[in-house]
Each structure stands twice: as structure tokens, then as C-alpha cells.
Image (cartoon, rainbow, N blue to C red):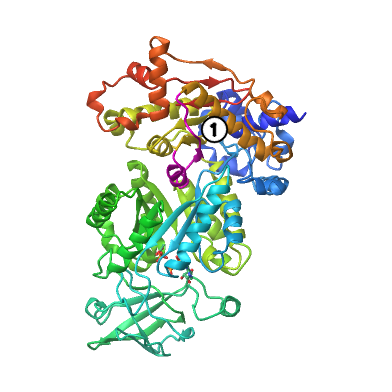
């Protein structure tokens, strides 16, 4: 019995929602209900007779024994005890509406959308980093506006320690660079108010002053960290101040009490500029609220004339280089120049750090294409964006930025206020859940938590909610939607063509993809095509493994590569089976008896009945054997930008790259690149 369960489970973990024949998929349409009628457009268009309405039927009662169970694979071994609970949750979700929402809609088994967690006072301990990682964090973000290098160093070390000891999970490290607020350095790409001994209540109609004098923090006047603030604002301008954030001088407990009492989160205060002197800006409070330390200050419709990378940023960037972080998130990028500048600097230090541009200022919008082209990805920083631009523009910009990033094959993160209420409450609002679902549907690589994990009361619950909502939403996304620039990309890069065909095969056959990559390029490219199945990316570089954690659908796995391709493939499959066996049956898999072929675990033996039913060669085996090594272990990264040197054509691809093993779907279907 254990064998059967394990095999089926392994199989279902490899399967994607698009598996099975059309008829089988059509079968899965039953029992449709409200959700299916709303969401299953393909199904409705395909055949009317399939839309038999049986509203109250549960999927659990409908599954045939021949179908793979829709399973939620735990994100980590520690989740195992809660697996039943997860099923229960899933079934509860299912009872709300329908489960078979479209022919592609079986719940996917591993979350594809990644979760970025901002680390702060609530989470900067060893215990919490571990718990966050086990709950589903994929990227740890450090906001350089808060804390100091010593505190961030501690977090980086803890994440690296976690990565070093974890066998099946790895966390990327992201530094969010901008000026740490300091009246000594007094510079930065963000405009922020200064430190306050305690929060101030601003009442509508009262007068309030911002000054560029240092160290002022009274009930009617506070410092601003930016000298040119005086020149940037005019009488009649509307200043927006965010009402979130912790006060550094308060204890966590007292902060929570204050927040609970006041119940004010995420609210923007607005102040109209009335007059200015050489060092102060006098305002009238229009919408009041609670002003805390170091709050964002934006002028509606204007961007501050700040440089995007300041001296303080350069110090932070160097800190990142020294610590070999994976990503910089660069604040207030207004043009591509700053990205080139940063990339040149990184090149000069021989640092392999990817640059994520934060789109958060009105000025960046006209330059979106060039900024994103120059970068490795973008963050929709909705907090500042919603302050600089009319708030109703934010959802439209979010959609547009995601679309641009996806069409360029760049990573995209949706950030800010996603579960804001969970800073103080243990459950999210419906609107927040919808917000996550929309970002997932729009195709974001990752969704981000800020105050929720940095200083919130329920950081782990917030991650779990994000995990569950993302997973559930992914299950309803139709497979096989290709990026719109495909034709263009198709002409230019053989590797794109290869990723495209691999994705098509994977979607059609209902398999996951295994890719071998030294630089991460092929895995990122595949992620860009959003195949329905998981992309298991094997790399022999730990840095690459760490970085790949950000990318949608990529499950990065570190493994030494052997000179013998066969051995490498075998090892990779063995590792996959061990990993899933660990998730599925910890008591057996953790018995220390190895974990590859020949292991005493019957599950693995059953799984190894998998045999290739198709392998494609286009020349003498020995030559192809070399080709395979190149293709699979070096990948197309060797020559993606020199297409003219390699005549294009599927036959050539087969010759140089392709050895495709499609395993009998009854066991563990895997497509190996
Ligand atoms: N390293 C840190 N130390 C102290 N507090 C932090 C830290 N990181 C984040 N926070 C708190 O979490 C809040 C939300 O994080 P984030 O959105 O990244 O910051 P902000 O909106 O201030 O740029 C911050 O306003 C701050 O109160
Ligand atoms: C992510 C954002 O920026 P910050 O890092 O300042 O919170 C934002 O403005 O949405």
C-alpha cells in the first residue's frame, strides 16, 4: 500500500494541471458549479454538454480512482504534520465553490509564485528565519532604510546558515537599497520624515511644518531628510505621508497596543502646502492620522529630484557585494542610466548580483521599457507609486509592469500592503486575499510581505495565507499561455526556441521539466514561458541555486555534475525521488539509509520502474553522447547570443541539445532538457 501511495504521490507531484487527454480533462470538469461557470471559459467553449451543474457536490466525492489526487505538497518537511490540515483547508476552499473550475484547473502540487519576506524586528532571529523558510518564504528582503549593517549581517548569516543545512529548500537574499535614515549622512533617494520620540496625532485642519533642520521632532514640526525638499515643493502641492511603520523608540508590545487602539494601517495622511521659508514648509493637514518615525513623504504627481543611488547606497551596495547577496532592489529608479551605472560597478567588482528596479515614482513611468530592459527584473512598489500617482492608476500600472516584465523575460515582484491588516490581526481581509490572487493571476514571479513579516504580530500566519492563496489561485490558471513576444524571441535565440518547445511538450504531455544549468539562464528562460509543470533546475553552483528561488515555477536543486551525463541524469532523478519521498514519508526517508537507487525504501524502488519510452538521437550515439553533455550540463548558455553561428532548425536543436526522455506517465513523467 505504501508503494502505491508513494508512487502516485510522486507522480502527482510531477504532474501539471494540463495532463491527460482532452476527454480526461473534460471528465475533470465534473462537477462544475458557480466557479466553473465563471472561470472555465475554455471548457464552456469546448463543449456545452460538459457544463452539467451540480452545485453542492464536492470533489472528494467525485474523484475516480484512476485519477491522480490533487495534492498540496508541503513546502518543507516540517509542514508534514500539517498536511492533513492543508487538505482540509483545500477542501474547505473547494466547498466554497467548485473544485474543477476548468479543464486545466486541478490544484497544482507545488506553489509556483514565490514569496518575498521583509525581515525586521519580528523575524530577525534564528528561530523565526527557520520558521519563515519552512512556512514558505523564498526570498529574504532586507530594507536598508532600517536597521544597520550589523543587524543585516546577522540576518544574511542566518539565511546562509539555513541554506547550508537545508536539503530541499533555499532562500534568496535581497537587499533593498536606499539611504538608511540618518541625520549625519542626510542623503538618500527617498524622502522621509525624521525620528520622533513618539507618534504624533495629526488632526485635520491643524497646521504642521516640515523642516530641513536636523533633529527636529515635536508635535507641530518634524525634520525631512532631504535639503532640496524646500525647492521641490510649491504652495498648493499635496504632500502624502504614509501611516504605517513602527516607531523605533517603542517596544514591540507597546507598538502593538497603540496600533490596536488606533486601528490605523496603511492609511495615507495628506497635507496641503501653504507657504515655505528657506528651511521650512508650512502645511495644513487635510486628512489626519498618526505620524510615526521615518515615514515616506511624497508630493502628489511629482518626483523628488534625488539621485537614485546615493553615497549611502554605494556603501550598502558594497555591503551586498561583500556578502554575495542575490539581488539588489533599487529604489526610485527613474531611468536606465542608474541601472547601467550599478551594473558597471558590479562588473568591476566581479560581483554576480541581479538588479531589481523598484517602480515607485511618477518619473519612472515614461521610461518603463528602457528601465526594465536594463535590469534583471522589477518590483511594483505600490506604496510610493500610489502616493506619487493617483491611487486608481496603481492596479493598471501593476498589470502593465507585469505584462512588460513577462514579455521581456524579467522577474517581477508585486509589493506592499498585500496582507497589511495581518500586521495586527491573525486573519486577512477578503480584499487582501483578492489582491494576492490578482497578482498571481497576472503572472507575477513573486508577491511580497513588508511590515507583515518585518514588525507584524503574525508573520508566520501571513506567509501561510500567502502560500495558500497563491497555491489555490495557481490551480485555476489555464496552462500553456505563452508570452506575447514569442514570435520575436523565436527568431532570435535558439535557446528560446528550445525552451518554447520544451514548454509545449511539457504542457501537452503533462510533465514537469528537469533542466541542468550552470548559470541559471535556461531555468529563467523556461520560467518565462510559464510551463504548467514545475521546473526542476539542477545546478552545480550554490549561488545560482539561491538566486533561482525568486523565479516563478522554478524549484532549484544543487547537485554536483558528473562527467558522465547518464550518471548525472540518474543522480538527478534519484535526488528528486528522495526529496519527494522525504516529503511523503519522513519516517522512511529520514532513516539515514542513503537515498538513491538501491535504497531500502520501497517507494523509490517502485518509482524507479520509470522507463524512458522515447529518446531522440540524431546521430551516432557517441557523438550525441557528447552533445548531450554539452546540452544538458553546459546548456544553451554557451551561445544564446550568437544565433548566427548556429543554424536554426529543429533538427539542429536535436543534434546539439536534445535528448528528451519522456517517462511513462504512469510513474513519474519528467521531461529532461
Ligand atoms: N530592519 C528593520 N529594522 C526595524 N524595522 C524594520 C526593519 N525592516 C522593516 N522594518 C519595519 O517594517 C516596516 C515595513 O517595512 P518596509 O515596507 O520595508 O519599510 P518602509 O515602508 O519603511 O520602506 C518599516 O516601516 C519598519 O517599521
Ligand atoms: C516597496 C516599497 O518601498 P519601501 O521599500 O520603501 O517600502 C513601496 O513603496 O511599495
**Residue found at the far top of this picture:** 620
Residue at 68% across / 24% down in the picture? 605
Residue 625 pos. (x, y %): 42, 17
Tell me the magenta residue range.
Answer: 541-563
Q: For residue 488, which quarter of the picture?
A: top left
Above or below, 659 against 291 in this view is above
The residue lying at 39 percent from left, 84 percent from top is 285
Residue 517 spot, x, y in % from top left: 42, 34
Q: Nearer the viewer, residue 126 or 140?
A: 126
Q: Is mark 1 within 8 Å of ligand 2?
A: no
Please identify the quarter of the rendering in which residue 501 is found.
Answer: top left
The residue closer to the viewer here, 20 or 358, is 358
- Whether residue 608 sits left or right of residue 181 in the image: it is right
Q: Is residue 41 visible?
A: yes
Q: Is residue 485 left or right of residue 29?
A: left
Residue 118: tell me if it is visible: no
556 falls in the magenta region: yes
- Left or right of 411: which side holds 95? right
In this rendering, the answer to whether 105 lies above or below 147 is: above
Quarter holding the N terminus is top right
Check disc 1: other Cα within 10 Å, few if <14, some if 14-19, many if 20+: many
Give x and y (percent) for residue 177: 36, 62
The residue depicted at 24 percent of the width and 89 percent of the height is: 277
Residue at the right extreme, as displayed: 1
Where does residue 621 sit, x and y in percent of width and height?
42, 11
User: Element type at marker 1?
Assistant: helix
Residue at label 1? 43
671 inside magenta stretch = no
Amino acid at each position: 500500500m505504501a508503494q502505491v501511495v508513494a508512487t502516485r504521490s510522486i507522480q502527482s507531484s510531477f504532474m501539471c494541471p494540463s495532463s491527460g487527454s482532452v476527454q480526461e480533462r473534460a471528465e475533470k470538469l465534473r462537477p462544475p458549479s458557480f466557479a466553473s461557470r465563471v472561470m472555465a471559459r475554455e471548457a464552456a467553449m469546448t463543449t456545452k454538454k460538459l457544463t452539467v451543474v451540480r452545485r453542492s457536490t464536492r470533489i472528494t466525492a467525485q474523484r475516480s480512482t484512476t485519477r491522480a489526487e490533487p495534492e498540496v505538497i508541503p513546502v518543507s518537511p516540517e509542514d508534514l504534520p500539517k498536511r492533513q490540515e492543508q487538505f482540509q483547508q483545500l477542501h474547505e476552499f473547494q466547498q466554497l465553490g467548485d473544485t474543477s473550475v476548468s479543464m486545466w484547473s486541478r490544484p497544482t502540487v507545488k506553489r509556483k509564485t514565490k514569496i518575498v519576506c521583509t525581515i525586521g524586528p519580528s523575524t530577525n532571529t534564528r528561530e523565526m528565519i527557520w520558521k519563515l523558510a519552512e512556512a514558505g518564504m523564498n526570498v529574504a528582503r532586507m530594507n536598508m532604510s532600517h536597521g544597520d549593517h550589523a543587524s543585516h549581517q546577522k540576518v544574511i548569516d542566518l539565511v546562509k546558515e539555513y541554506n547550508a543545512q537545508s536539503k530541499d529548500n533555499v532562500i534568496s537574499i535581497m537587499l533593498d537599497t536606499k539611504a538608511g535614515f540618518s541625520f549625519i549622512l542626510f542623503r538618500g533617494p527617498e524622502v522621509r520624515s525624521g525620528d520622533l520620540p513618539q507618534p504624533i496625532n495629526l488632526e485635520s485642519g491643524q497646521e504642521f511644518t516640515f523642516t530641513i533642520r536636523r533633529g527636529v521632532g515635536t508635535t507641530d514640526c518634524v525634520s525631512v531628510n532631504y535639503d532640496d525638499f524646500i525647492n521641490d515643493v510649491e504652495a498648493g502641492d499635496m504632500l502624502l505621508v504614509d501611516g504605517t511603520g513602527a516607531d523605533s523608540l517603542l517596544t514591540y508590545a507597546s507598538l502593538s497596543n497603540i496600533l490596536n487602539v488606533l486601528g490605523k494601517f496603511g492609511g495615507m495622511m495628506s497635507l496641503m502646502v501653504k507657504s515655505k521659508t528657506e528651511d521650512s514648509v508650512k502645511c495644513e493637514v487635510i486628512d489626519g492620522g498618526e505620524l510615526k518615525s521615518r515615514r515616506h513623504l511624497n508630493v502628489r504627481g511629482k518626483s523628488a529630484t534625488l539621485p537614485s543611488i546615493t553615497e549611502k547606497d554605494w556603501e550598502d551596495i558594497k555591503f551586498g557585494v561583500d556578502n554575495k547577496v542575490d539581488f539588489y532592489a533599487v529604489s526610485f529608479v527613474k531611468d536606465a542610466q542608474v541601472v547601467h551605472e550599478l551594473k558597471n560597478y558590479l562588473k568591476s567588482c566581479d560581483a554576480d548580483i541581479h538588479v531589481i528596479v523598484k517602480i515607485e515614482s511618477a518619473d519612472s513611468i515614461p521610461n518603463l521599457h528602457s528601465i526594465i530592459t536594463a535590469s534583471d527584473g522589477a518590483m511594483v512598489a505600490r506604496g510610493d507609486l500610489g502616493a506619487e500617482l493617483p491611487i486608481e492608476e496603481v492596479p493598471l500600472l501593476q498589470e502593465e509592469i507585469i505584462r512588460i516584465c513577462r514579455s521581456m523575460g524579467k522577474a517581477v515582484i508585486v509589493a506592499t500592503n498585500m496582507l497589511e491588516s495581518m500586521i495586527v490581526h491573525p486573519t486577512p481581509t477578503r480584499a487582501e486575499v483578492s489582491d494576492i490572487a490578482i497578482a498571481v493571476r497576472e503572472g507575477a514571479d513573486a508577491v511580497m510581505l513588508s511590515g507583515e513579516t518585518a514588525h507584524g504580530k503574525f508573520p508566520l500566519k501571513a506567509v501561510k495565507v500567502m502560500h495558500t492563496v497563491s497555491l489555490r489561485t495557481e490551480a485555476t490558471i489555464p496552462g500553456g499561455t505563452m508570452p506575447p513576444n514569442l514570435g520575436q524571441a523565436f527568431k532570435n535565440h535558439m535557446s528560446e526556441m528550445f525552451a518554447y518547445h520544451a514548454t509545449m511538450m511539457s504542457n501537452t504531455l503533462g510533465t514537469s521539466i528537469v533542466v541542468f544549468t550552470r548559470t541559471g539562464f535556461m531555468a529563467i528562460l523556461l520560467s518565462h514561458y510559464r510551463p504548467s509543470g514545475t521546473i526542476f533546475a539542477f545546478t552545480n553552483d550554490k549561488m545560482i541555486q539561491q538566486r533561482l528561488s525568486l523565479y516563478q515555477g522554478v524549484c532549484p536543486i544543487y547537485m554536483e555534475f558528473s562527467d558522465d551525463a547518464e550518471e548525472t541524469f540518474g543522480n538527478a532523478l534519484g535526488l528528486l525521488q528522495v526529496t519527494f519521498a522525504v516529503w511523503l514519508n519522513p519516517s522512511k526517508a529520514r532513516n539515514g539509509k542513503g537515498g538513491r537507487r538501491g535504497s531500502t525504501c520501497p517507494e523509490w524502488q517502485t518509482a524507479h520502474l520509470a522507463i524512458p519510452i522515447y529518446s531522440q538521437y540524431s546521430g551516432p550515439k557517441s557523438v550525441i553522447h557528447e552533445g548531450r553533455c554539452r546540452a544538458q550540463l553546459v546548456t544553451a548558455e554557451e551561445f544564446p547570443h550568437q544565433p548566427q553561428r548556429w543554424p536554426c532548425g529543429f533538427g539542429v536543436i536535436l543534434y546539439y541539445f536534445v535528448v528528451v526522455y519522456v517517462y511513462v506517465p504512469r510513474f513519474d513523467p519528467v521531461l529532461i532538457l
